[in-house]
Amino acid sequence: MLLTFFGCMPTLLNAAYPFAGEERDGRKTLPLKISKQKRFMKKWVVLWATLVGSTTTFGQITITDADMPEVNDVFNISVASDFTNVDPSQTGANYTWDFSFLTYATQRQDEYVPPSDAPIAYEWFFNNPLAPAYMASYATIGDDIDIFGFLTMTNNFQFFQNDADEYEMVGFGANINGIPAPVRYNPKDVIYQFPMNYGNIDSSYAEYTLGVPGIGDYSQYIWRNNEVDGWGELTLPLGTFPTLRVKTELNLIDSLDLDTLGFPLGLTRPTTIEYKWLGVETGVPLLTITESFGVITNVEYQDFFVGVEEVLGDEAFAAYPNPANTYLSIAFQEAPNGTIQLLDLEGRAIVTLPLRPNAKNYRINTSTLANGTYVLRFTSKEGVGMRKVVVAH
């Protein structure tokens, strides 16, 4: 039971980018964070042009607090299904990383909510003007945990503070066996220091102690070392982005002081390496690769969000030419029974095609559409199929 406790506590309490579960409440959106997509429209025309052979290049960027999440942002995250060809070791100045081959096993949506959405017991600790050092900019909501009925953790919130100097986790709150337990990091867990430029190196230390009713005190000690070891262009299934690469070395010690023993038990965890690619106004990392003992344990990236429907394979239908100039042809293997839509990157339906009985071939007039990237979406009772489509006149 003790080992189970040690294994489960860090999952909830040490996540700098939470929501380890899958998609929530069946919500479906299109790429990147929702609240900032209007800002992205001009950038997307340039970024996606690289997919069709553009010679567009990006200069070195600087990451600041303006590039972190904002309240009510929602991010579409895919967890990769296969790490075979993933190699995070290559980096440097003006480097090109190509991870366009990634495919997802699961998807989720990470949402950043106002601190006022948290239970009132947490607000006093993280939304209190009398304690400005711990005033959170926003919070994220974690999944409930039940460890064989021995320990339940519900109403899980993680609180973050973002300012011109630092992006940090200030604490968390959870109902431990039904009792609200807000906990502040002291010192706070500084995730990034700003401004962030290629070659920057920084480190931080954080710790917290959580009283677990009927068990004792659980503490965690965190050493974080960051190095911005690369800049350049990152290509994902979603597109190509100017980026900074940050290598983070995490060393953690867990300690449990049991009421029945009267002395603490410590566990030093293996060093974890996180490779994170940060972009301008992309909020959370575009790509995160996690490594332990030299073995990749997780790969997740910002992506189009399909949702809970079954994904139709490439054989279901084809769309050509791509890029399209005056028209886009759509050819189905079988006469479709569903909905065909062309969406912009804000998820708005630009074109909806009426279906014809027994027809397998359709055409969309693209001559009047603005240059840029769109999503062709076919939805039926069998599932959903999506294709990225570029319009270029």
Image (spheres, rainbow, N blue to C red):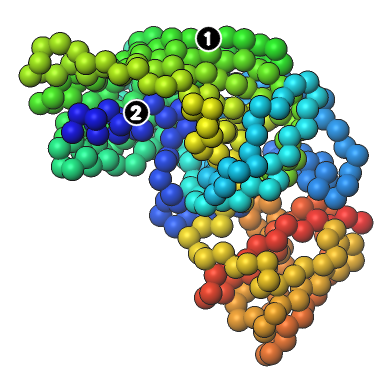
Q: Quadrant of the N terminus?
A: top left
The residue to which callout 1 is attached is 203
Residue 9 seen in this snapshot: yes
The residue to which callout 2 is attached is 10
What type is the residue that disc 1 sits on? Ser
Residue 107 badge: none
Residue 33 seen in this snapshot: no
Hey, which quadrant is residue 236 in on the image?
top right
22 on left or right of 356: left
Q: Quadrant of the C terminus?
A: bottom right
For the residue carrying disc 1, how many other residues have a C-alpha within 10 Å: few (<14), some (14-19), or many (20+)? some
Residue at 40% x, 54% y is 25
| Furthest residue in direction left, as rendered | 260
Residue at 24% x, 30% y is 3
21 on left or right of 342: left
| As drawn, 280 above or below 393 | above
Hey, which quadrant is residue 356 in on the image?
bottom right
Badge 2 marks a residue whose secondary structure is: helix
Nearest to the observer: residue 35 or residue 193: 193
Nearest to the observer: residue 264 or residue 23: 264
Badge 1 marks a residue whose secondary structure is: strand
Residue at 14% x, 19% y is 258
Residue 73 location (% of width, % of height): 53, 38
Mark nearer the N terminus (2 vs 1): 2
What type is the residue that disc 2 sits on? Pro
Nearest to the observer: residue 236 or residue 352: 236
- What is the number of callouts on the image? 2
For the residue carrying disc 2, how many other residues have a C-alpha within 10 Å: few (<14), some (14-19), or many (20+)? few
| As drawn, 180 above or below 185 | below
374 on left or right of 327: left
